[in-house]
C-alpha cells in the first residue's frame, strides 16, 4: 500500500476514474448493442446521434482511442444504412 499522502490520493483518484470509465464504457456498449438489435431503420436512425455522442465522449475522455471511436461510429452507420426501409 502507498505510504505517502500524495500517493494515497492518486490511488483514490485512479480507482474513481477507473470506475467511472467502466460505467460509461459499459453503458455505451449496451446502447450500441441495443441499436444493432433494432430492425426498423427509422428508429435506429433516430437513436444514432445519441449513441455517436456517447462514443465521442468516451474518446474525448480518453477511455477509448479516437480511431476506435471512428470505427465504431462507421460500423454503426453501415449497419443502419443496410437496414430495410
Image (cartoon, rainbow, N blue to C red):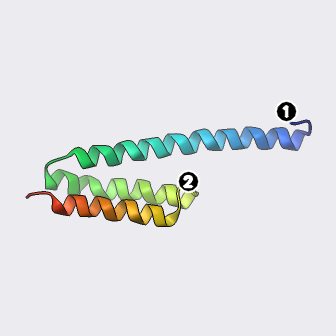
Q: Which mark is residue 63?
A: 2
The spot of residue 25 in percent (x, y) is 48, 46
Q: Is residue 77 left or right of residue 22?
A: left
Q: Quadrant of residue 37?
A: top left
Q: Which residue is mark 1?
A: 1
Q: Quadrant of the N terminus?
A: top right
Sequence-wise first label, 2 or 1: 1
Name the spot of residue 51 as percent of width and height, x first: 35, 53
Q: Residue at x 33, y 65 (%)?
A: 74
- The residue under the point 77% across, 40% down is 11
User: Is 4 displayed left or right of 28 in the figure?
Assistant: right
- Judged from this view, the residue extending furthest toward the left is 85
Query: Measuring 85% from the left and 42% from the top, which residue is drawn there?
Result: 7
* Above or below 24: residue 71: below
The residue sitting at 54% across, 41% down in the picture is 22
Badge 1, how many Cα within 10 Å: few under 14, some, many 20+?
few
Q: Secondary structure at mark 2?
A: loop
Please rate how many residues cluster around mark 2, counting C-alpha atoms within 10 Å: few if below 14, some from 14 to 19, many from 20: some
Q: CA distance from mark 2 to mark 1?
A: 26 Å
Are dots 2 and 1 in contact, CB under 8 Å?
no
Quadrant in the rendering for residue 21: top right
Residue 29 position within the rendered picture, expressed as x and y whole percent measured from the top left: 40, 46
41 left or right, relative to 34: left
Image quadrant assignment for residue 49: bottom left
**Viewer-closest of 75 and 44:** 75
Left or right of residue 14, residue 19 in this image:
left
Amino acid at each position: 500500500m502507498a505510504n505517502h499522502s500524495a500517493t494515497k490520493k492518486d490511488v483514490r483518484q485512479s480507482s474513481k476514474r477507473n470506475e467511472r470509465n467502466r460505467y460509461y464504457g459499459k453503458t455505451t456498449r449496451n446502447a450500441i448493442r441495443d441499436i444493432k438489435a433494432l430492425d426498423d431503420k427509422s428508429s435506429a436512425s433516430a437513436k444514432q446521434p445519441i449513441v455517436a455522442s456517447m462514443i465521442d465522449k468516451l474518446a474525448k475522455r480518453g477511455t477509448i482511442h479516437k480511431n476506435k471511436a471512428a470505427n465504431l461510429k462507421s460500423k454503426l452507420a453501415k449497419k443502419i444504412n443496410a437496414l430495410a426501409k
